[in-house]
């Protein structure tokens, strides 16, 4: 590719990003004259205009007033958490609509009871799980994890990062990598303000609880969540790189070793560098222990600022190389030479660390800036692990564009009782496909190569907060859209849609994105 061609590609990418920003703006200009609702003082987040036009609700009554105004003025109302989901999943694209952040009482954690078996706590849904580095009001001491650790109790699972709010983590069915532990086992009750400004509260065992736990904000504004937390634990494990032939991506007796490893360990995730001249895995495996000794902290390879800068440089160069044909041997060799430096065959990186440090293993990585990623996450029944890898491994070998300039992550999730969780009704195997946000090219085209391979497998579903396929477009043998969703969630979706209408009859929380996905 010539310098002129590269320049043209870069210009096209710039125009595409500008169009996306206009469709889903990061900030809004407040228009108080259109509504009598009080505009609360905005939160200012470092580097992002998160404050302009965002109403900050500090009490349940504040939320009710805002919902009243949205319903009266025929506006959409959506809640901004840490904004790690794609914008279309969170916000309306209309600048007139209302964005709300939760603060004050809606971030507080209250102990209801505590004994030797653990503690029951009621937490404001706007409370971050850990410290959110993008919000200067967020600290370790006011995080949920920090306050639970001070009580000597813990959650059973965390995601790869702990920046999310409680509501955001639950509503999109986010999950860490475990077949043994799931967040649902700790949930006792969920409270929210519905589209009629009524306060709803349901406990485990009710249909409404299982419908609202994963609802993408379409039932209302989650205000409080009650957890039953277990005694704190530690995680003992190791992170190590392997040649693919020596890794969990090898087969024995017709099944990949990964399947048994997922069942055998408390927590596991595997990153596969599928580039022709890399073909290595980074395997993170951890198990619970009660003893703190010997304390060995988990340290990420990308914890260092200089390693992060180097990684960003490699991602940039690798992306530019993929604009040539990565199937060509010279290009494939250059890409391999760059990435091999990040998956050396060194001794294992062992750790014996606190639950809140070890489980969100990407907290030490600059995921909000230099290593910020888009991704799609495909959830498959665990029984489809071998068929999925049998498709992906040869497909990527034949078409190196699928390998990209980063890794593909494989991990699992425990069966969930929440009706719209992608893990509802079965344990699942998950495929995370990453796209560096600064890449030149089209993320949807890149993800589409994986959707072509995997969406037609029985039971395929997707993470609600990440990139979804284009509604109406065919991938492999299936067309993504409302019919696909209804088939994937056939056990409960009709009842879930009826409850959504019951709790939000005026569509206060229903954006055009979700209308399109569900065919409403």
Image (tube, rainbow, N blue to C red):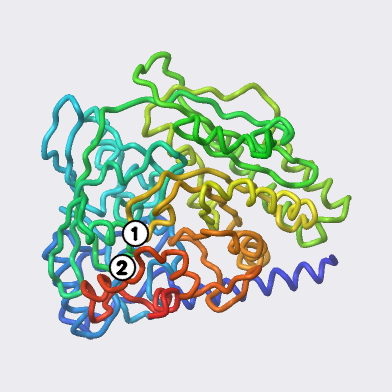
Q: Residue at x 79, y 46 (%)?
A: 276
Q: Residue beneath label 1, please?
A: 419
Q: Residue at x 27, y 31 (%)?
A: 149
Q: Quadrant of the N terminus?
A: bottom right
Q: Is residue 262 above or below residue 128?
A: above
Q: Quadrant of residue 243?
A: top right
- Secondary structure of the residue carrying numbered label 2: helix
Q: Which mark is residue 243?
A: none
Picture coordinates of residue 142 (x, y %)?
24, 42
Depth check: give the residue in front, 133 or 178. 178
Q: Residue at x 17, y 59 (%)?
A: 58
Picture coordinates of residue 101 (x, y %)?
27, 62
**Mark 1 or 2 closer to N-term?**
1
Q: Residue beneath label 2, please?
A: 496
Neighbourhood count class around disc 1 (C-alpha, 10 Å): few under 14, some 14–19, many 20 upward: many
Depth check: give the residue in front, 505 or 136. 505
Q: Is residue 370 visible?
A: no
- Secondary structure of the residue carrying numbered label 1: loop
Q: Are marks 1 and 2 in contact (CB under 8 Å)?
A: yes
């Amino acid at each position: 590719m010539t310098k002129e061609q590269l320049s043209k590609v870069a210009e096209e990418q710039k125009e595409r990003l500008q169009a996306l920003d206009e469709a889903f703006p990061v900030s809004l200009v407040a228009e108080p004259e259109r509504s009598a609702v009080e505009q609360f003082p905005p939160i200012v987040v470092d580097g992002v205009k998160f404050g302009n036009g965002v109403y900050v609700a500090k009490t349940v009554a504040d939320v009710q007033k805002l919902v009243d105004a949205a319903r009266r003025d025929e506006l959409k109302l959506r809640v901004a958490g840490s904004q790690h989901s794609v914008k279309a999943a969170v916000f309306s694209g209309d600048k007139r609509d209302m964005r709300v952040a939760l603060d004050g009482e809606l971030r507080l954690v209250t102990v209801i009871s505590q004994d030797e078996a653990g503690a029951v706590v009621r937490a404001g849904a706007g409370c971050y799980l850990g410290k959110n580095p993008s919000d200067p009001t967020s600290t370790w001491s006011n995080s949920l994890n920090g306050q639970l650790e001070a009580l000597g109790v813990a959650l059973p699972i965390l995601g790869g990062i702990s920046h999310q709010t409680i509501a955001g983590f639950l509503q999109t069915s986010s999950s860490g990598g475990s077949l043994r532990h799931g967040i649902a086992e700790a949930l006792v009750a969920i409270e929210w303000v519905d589209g009629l400004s009524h306060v709803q509260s349901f406990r485990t065992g009710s249909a409404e609880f299982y419908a609202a736990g994963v609802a993408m904000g379409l039932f209302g504004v989650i205000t409080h969540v009650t957890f039953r937390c277990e005694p704190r634990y530690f995680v003992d494990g190791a992170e190590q790189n392997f040649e693919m032939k020596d890794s969990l991506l090898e087969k024995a007796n017709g099944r990949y070793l990964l399947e048994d490893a997922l069942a055998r360990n408390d927590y596991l995730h595997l990153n596969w560098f599928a580039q022709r001249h890399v073909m290595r895995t980074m395997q993170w495996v951890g198990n619970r222990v009660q003893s703190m000794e010997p304390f060995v902290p988990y340290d990420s390879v990308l914890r260092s600022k200089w390693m992060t800068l180097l990684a960003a440089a490699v991602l940039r160069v690798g992306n530019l190389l993929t604009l040539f044909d990565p199937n060509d041997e010279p290009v494939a060799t250059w890409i391999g030479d760059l990435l091999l430096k990040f998956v050396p065959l060194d001794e294992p990186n062992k750790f014996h660390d606190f639950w809140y440090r070890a489980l969100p293993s990407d907290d030490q990585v600059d995921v909000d800036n230099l290593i910020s990623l888009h991704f799609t996450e495909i959830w498959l029944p665990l029984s489809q692990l071998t068929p999925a890898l049998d498709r992906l491994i040869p497909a990527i070998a034949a078409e190196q564009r699928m390998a990209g300039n980063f890794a593909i992550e494989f991990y699992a999730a425990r069966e969930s009782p929440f009706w719209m969780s992608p893990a509802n009704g079965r344990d699942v195997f998950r495929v995370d496909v990453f796209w560096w946000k600064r890449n030149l090219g089209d993320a949807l085209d890149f993800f589409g190569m994986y959707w072509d391979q995997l969406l037609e497998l029985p039971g395929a579903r997707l993470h609600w907060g990440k990139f979804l396929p284009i509604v109406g477009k065919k991938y492999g043998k299936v067309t993504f859209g409302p019919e696909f969703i209804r088939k994937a969630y056939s056990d409960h979706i009709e009842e879930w849609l009826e409850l959504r209408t019951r709790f939000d009859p005026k569509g206060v929380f229903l954006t055009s994105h979700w209308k399109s996905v569900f065919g409403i």
